[in-house]
Image (cartoon, grey):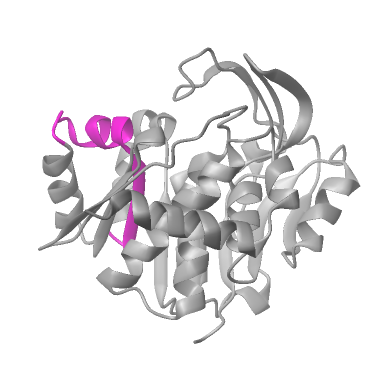
Amino acid sequence: MATNEVLIVGTVALDSVKTPFGHVQNALGGSASYASTACSFFSPARIISIVGEDFPPEHLAFLQSRGIDTSGIKKEGKTFHWEGFYEFDMNEAKTIRTELNSLATFAIGMPPSYRDAKYLFLANIDPKLQMDVLDAVNAPHLVVMDTMNFWISSRKRELLEVIRRVDVLVLNDGEARQLFGTVSLLKAARQALSLGPEAVIIKKGEHGALLFTDDRHFSAPGYPLEEVKDPTGCGDCFGGGLVGYLAKEGKHDEKTLRKAIVYGSVLASYNAEDFSLNRLRTLKSGDIEGRYREMKDIREF
């Protein structure tokens, strides 16, 4: 099996989060932080992002301890900060405050060594920046992208242009319905596939995920967690775990995509068990494989 590095563009942030089970202030967050950490369990990751001069060095040290290349993270101004809370419906975050700070003027600067990346994950960030990365990379073998409702509302035209250039589109059920103006996830997936991707993955939170290709579809289960402390970043862990596994295998046929979705779901389920990236700090490969086998048993009949 091939081992390939994954290039990830997304946010590296400081999050302040409150749930019914506790809270954290200025914890490590951001789509690239979660995605790269999840990816690192399968394949080496590189990040393109920006932080401020106020970004705690111990957060960078943690990413580096996972073997993540952080040389593509710029440092200037003040770090992107998100503050939000969850009520007992842990599928929906309520935003209190978003401070873009240095992210507001972030321009992609691609280290020359990153341009030959074969696996690319466009994590949740402005689609204009996603497109800049696509334009800067030479000939990627696989491009996976994620997005969110904010970009669907504010940058729909640019978002659709990015979708036309990727291989795998990942979005949640609410975003799929919003983007394509339909309550039917099957119709939304078909419309997305017509734009050009080979596969569309629709996340359904605690209820699992759906995979659609031109002639097949697959339903992955959600893992039934007894304790959920903080679901922040679970979607990013899903995407990072998915692309990391695909890069490890060096292929993305439908059978491998199915396995990658389950591995992504496993990483997301562990992430929900604690705040920030705290659970992934102590996670072992044996834990991942054990829960993967449980997921297989859940779906067998």
Where does the image place residue 146, in percent across and percent down from the top left?
Answer: 42, 48
Vertical side of 219 occupied by 166: above or below: below
- Residue most toward the bottom? 1
Magenta segment, which residues? 164-184
In the rendered image, residue 47 lying in the magenta stretch gets the answer: no
Question: Does residue 283 appear to the left or right of 265 in the view shown?
Answer: right
Where does the image place residue 174, in percent across and percent down from the top left?
Answer: 31, 30
Asked which quadrant contains residue 232, the reply is top right
Asked which quadrant contains residue 148, the reply is top left
- Determine if residue 197 is in view: no
Where does the image place residue 204, in percent across and percent down from the top left?
Answer: 34, 36
Vertical side of 257 occupied by 99: above or below: above
Question: Does residue 218 appear to the left or right of 142 in the view shown?
Answer: left
Question: Does residue 67 appear to the left or right of 130 in the view shown?
Answer: right
In the rendered image, residue 175 lying in the magenta stretch gets the answer: yes
Q: Residue at x 84, y 41 (%)?
A: 55
Between 106 and 37, the one nearer to me in the picture? 37
Q: Residue at x 75, y 50 (%)?
A: 281
Q: Residue at x 73, y 56 (%)?
A: 73
Across the whole image, how many numbered discs are drawn on residues? 0
Q: Residue at x 20, y 50 (%)?
A: 192
Between 229 and 170, the one nearer to me in the picture? 229
- Determine if residue 38 is in view: yes
Where does the image place residue 260, in percent across and percent down from the top left?
Answer: 41, 63
Vertical side of 117 occupied by 35: above or below: above
